[in-house]
Amino acid sequence: MNDRLLKMEQVAERLGTTVRFPRRLVEERRITFVKVGRHVRIRESVVEAYIAANTVEPVTLARQLKAVA
């Protein structure tokens, strides 16, 4: 299994955010992380799971009509 440990900068780049955002996720314990000495790393699979868990699907016209009925 090739599950790389990513630095905060790499996680931020993958999420399209600043480094402050993944650091806040770690601080608030909203994402699983690994301590390597004093360094904090996040597994690539955890980042992918975080993205999947926070992906919002668009509302389709059929779903809108069901909600109204």
Image (tube, rainbow, N blue to C red):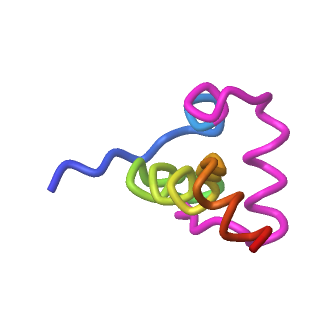
Q: Position of residue 55 (x, y in %)?
A: 60, 52
Q: Nearer the viewer, residue 47 or 63?
A: 63
User: In this view of the protein, which residue sits in the foreground, 60 or 51?
Assistant: 60
Q: Nearer the viewer, residue 68 or 45?
A: 68
Who's the residue at 65% across and 56% down the image?
38
- Left or right relative to 67: residue 36: left
Is residue 29 a member of the stretch shown in magenta? yes
Residue 60 in picture, x, y percent from top left:
60, 49
Whole-percent x, y for residue 47 in the image: 51, 50
Q: Residue at x 64, y 65 (%)?
A: 31
What is the total number of numbered labels drawn onto the structure image?
Answer: 0
Looking at the image, can residue 39 be seen?
no
Indicate whether 20 appears above or below 63: above
Q: Is residue 65 magenta?
A: no
Tell me the quadrant of the picture where the N terminus can be found: bottom left
The residue drawn where x is 63% and y is 35% is 15
In the image, residue 45 sits, relative to residue 10, either above or below, namely: below
Q: Is residue 65 left or right of residue 27?
A: left
Relative to 20, 66 lies left or right: left
State the residue lying farthest toward the left. 1
Camera sees residue 5: yes
Residue at the far front in the pictured view: 69
First to last magenta residue range: 12-35
Q: Could you tell me which quadrant the C terminus lies in?
A: bottom right
- Determine which quarter of the picture holds residue 7: top right
Q: What residue is drawn where x is 45% and y is 50%?
A: 48
52 vs 58: above or below = below
